[in-house]
Image (cartoon, grey):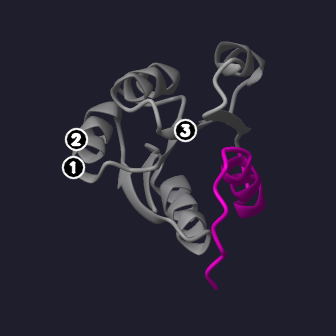
Amino acid sequence: MRALLVEDEALVAMIAEEALTSLGFEPTSARNAAEAMNEFNRREPSLAVIDVGLPDAKGDELAMRLRALSPDLSIVVASGYDEGELKAKFASDPKVAVLPKPYTEDDLARATEALGFRLPRVS
């Protein structure tokens, strides 16, 4: 399954990409919303993991744009800030999970499982 990771911090992106790979996804990364839109159109992922604090857009707004383009897309919105507002914003959307940062591979696994993914972990 293809995953799109949208994260502007290189170290966080590297760790998250490794976690997605070990969860059985085929990730591709974007550092901002513009790159994310290009990669989304090119790869048509099943999952998007989006940081809220992007340099060129708010990650939650990007999530809503991607959702409009692909209603079946599952989305994990990650935030290092108070996630209460994000949870309220996406509460009615079962295809969106909110994940507090920093997060571990297990946290990401739980978020993807909550979205319905049942992928075997790859060692």
Amino acid type, residue under disc 2 in the picture: Asn
C-alpha span from label 3 to label 1: 17 Å
Q: Is residue 123 above or below residue 60?
A: below
Q: Position of residue 85 (x, y in %)?
A: 72, 14
Residue at the image position 68 percent from the left and 17 percent from the top: 92
Q: Quadrant of the C terminus?
A: bottom right
Quadrant hosting residue 104? bottom right
Amino acid type, residue under disc 3 in the picture: Ile
Q: Position of residue 23 (x, y in %)?
A: 62, 68
Give the labeled residue for mark 2.
38
Q: Magenta residues, as a range?
A: 102-123
Q: Position of residue 22 (x, y in %)?
A: 60, 74
Mark 2 or 3: the one toward you: 3
Q: Position of residue 4 (x, y in %)?
A: 42, 50
Residue at the image position 56 percent from the left and 59 percent from the top: 16
C-alpha span from label 2 to label 1: 6 Å
Given contact means CB atoms under 8 Å apart, are the residues at marks 2 and 1 in contact?
yes
Quadrant hosting residue 115? top right
Residue at the image position 22 percent from the left and 41 percent from the top: 38
Please check the rendered image and state whether residue 120 is part of the magenta-colored stretch, yes or no.
yes
Q: Earlier in the sequence, mark 2 or mark 3?
A: 2
Q: Earlier in the sequence, mark 3 or mark 1?
A: 1
Mark 2 or 1: the one toward you: 1
Crowd class of label 1 (few under 14; some 14 to 19; many from 20; radius 10 Å): few
Q: Is residue 44 above or below residue 2?
A: above
Give the labeled residue for mark 3.
75
SS class of the residue under badge 3?
strand
Residue at the image position 47 percent from the left and 39 percent from the top: 73
Checking the image for residue 42, the label placed there is 1
SS class of the residue under badge 1?
helix
SS class of the residue under badge 2?
helix
